[in-house]
Amino acid sequence: MQIILGLLAILVVFALSYFMSNDKKNINYKGIIIMLVLELVITWFMFSTQIGAIIINGVSSVFNKLIEFGSAGIQFVLGGFELQEGGVFFFNVLLLIVFFATILSVLTYLKILPTIIKWVGGLVSKVTGLPKIESFNGVNSIFFGQSEALLAIKSQFHHLNENRLYTVSASAMSSVSASIVGSYIQILPEKYILIALPLNMFSSLIISSFIAPVKVSKEEDEIDITDVCNDKSLFEAMGNGALDGGKVALIVAANLIAFIASLELVNWAIQSVFAGVTLQQILGYVFAPIGYLMGIPASELIKAGSIMGTKIVTNEFVAMLEFQPLLEVISEKTIGIVTVFLTSFANFSSIGIIAGTVKGIDTEKASIVSKFGMKLLGGSILTSILSATIAGLFL
């Protein structure tokens, strides 16, 4: 029964994506089917085979070891503080972004990450039939944040029509930055966060293939990626990575303060009219139907739906922090589905971030992004639903 509901959820997502399409006649159904099969195979392999389990445990061990190293740096600087039980979120979680951003910067300087992204992106393009720019950007978005991913293809913006611009923007919004994955796995189970990374890449390309089909000539499919690393030495790369990570940590902290405080304000306003009702409860009922199709047990629909809705109206960190206390009282299936759903930048604030980045590259195209901003968010929500549903099929 759960498999039937999951397949129905996928069909609903596809139907909504088709309804939102800019060009229904040129939808790349072959590429969509190939990417869906790849998602199913990857998820089955990771969740249902011994080798997949070894890979997930191995990657998790690497992240956990990096967290240990990062924690040593934090302890050296802040070791004199007397922390209450559970610590301080900014110190224990967000400051890890500094170290992870440093590692990412070093790997970029050494050309290790760019080489991996180039070859994997080329393979995705060849297998799916998608243009190289879109394929490269999809892979690039796994590692870099929304702004950095788009800056890497800024030299190609003159090639991007509205549909192609939608696709690269959707990949940026539907992903997460590798620099903050270390913070995520301090809050929620790492295996679900890690599987969400490739799932979101393919899901975003699938949904974009429905909403904004892309067809390019051979001449337009040439790609020359901008080298966004301007560091002249390894130590400069480390220093700049640390500074960038510090900025991200402060931005996340500022957003958390603003969003959580605003959520409290909205709940106070709602409860002034409807006693005992919160925005999270309202969102829980809104998301309950699709949550049921995704495979969430009926008894946990409202709780899970409220978390998913909170992520959309605030951001993933706020939702993850609300979800963390529930891990001990809900099923493993719900934990997996909701965690995968939360692992992306799909929220209202991301529209502004992407539009602002594009404006810095090409002012004219920034107005195009602003025009399809809500469709971009809608597609990214469908991406999160598709990824979470596929994960749920194997839980």
Image (spheres, helix red, strand yellow):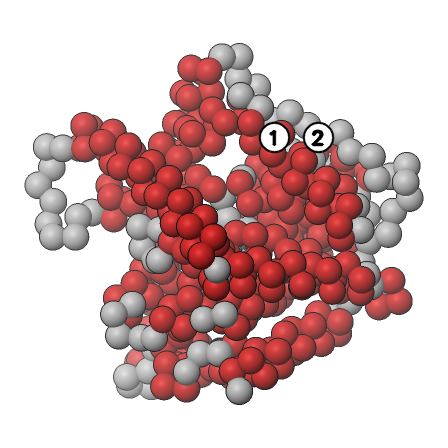
Left/right of residue 22 with respect to residue 77 in the rendered view: right
- Identify the residue at image location x=31%, y=55%: 187
Residue 134, percent from left and from top: 72, 46
Q: Is residue 52 above or below residue 222?
A: below
Q: Is residue 179 above or below residue 231?
A: below
The quadrant in which residue 62 appears is top left
Left/right of residue 231 with respect to residue 243 in the rendered view: right
Please tell me which of labels 1 and 2 falls first in the chain: 1
Residue 55, percent from left and from top: 45, 48
Looking at the rendered image, the quarter that the C terminus falls into is bottom left
Q: Is residue 372 above or below residue 148?
A: below
- Identify the residue at image location x=53%, y=40%: 143
Q: Residues within 10 Å of mark 1 (few under 14, many from 20)?
A: some
Q: Residues within 10 Å of mark 2 (few under 14, many from 20)?
A: some
Q: Is residue 84 above or below residue 243?
A: below
- Identify the residue at image location x=41%, y=83%: 297
- Identify the residue at image location x=10%, y=32%: 80
The quadrant in which residue 342 appears is bottom left
Q: Nearer the viewer, residue 8 or 258?
A: 8
Residue 383 seen anywhere in this rendered image of the structure = no
Q: Determine whether label 1 and label 2 are within 8 Å by CB.
A: yes
Q: Nearer the viewer, residue 318 or 66?
A: 66
Mark number displayed over residue 225? 2
Identity, as a three-letter code, of the amino acid under mark 1: Pro
Residue 373, percent from left and from top: 65, 58
Give the structural element (helix, strand or loop) at label 1: helix
Mark number displayed over residue 248? none
Residue 365, percent from left and from top: 74, 44
Q: Which residue is mark 1?
A: 114
Give the structural element (helix, strand or loop) at label 2: loop
Residue 90 seen anywhere in this rendered image of the structure = yes
Identity, as a three-letter code, of the amino acid under mark 2: Ile
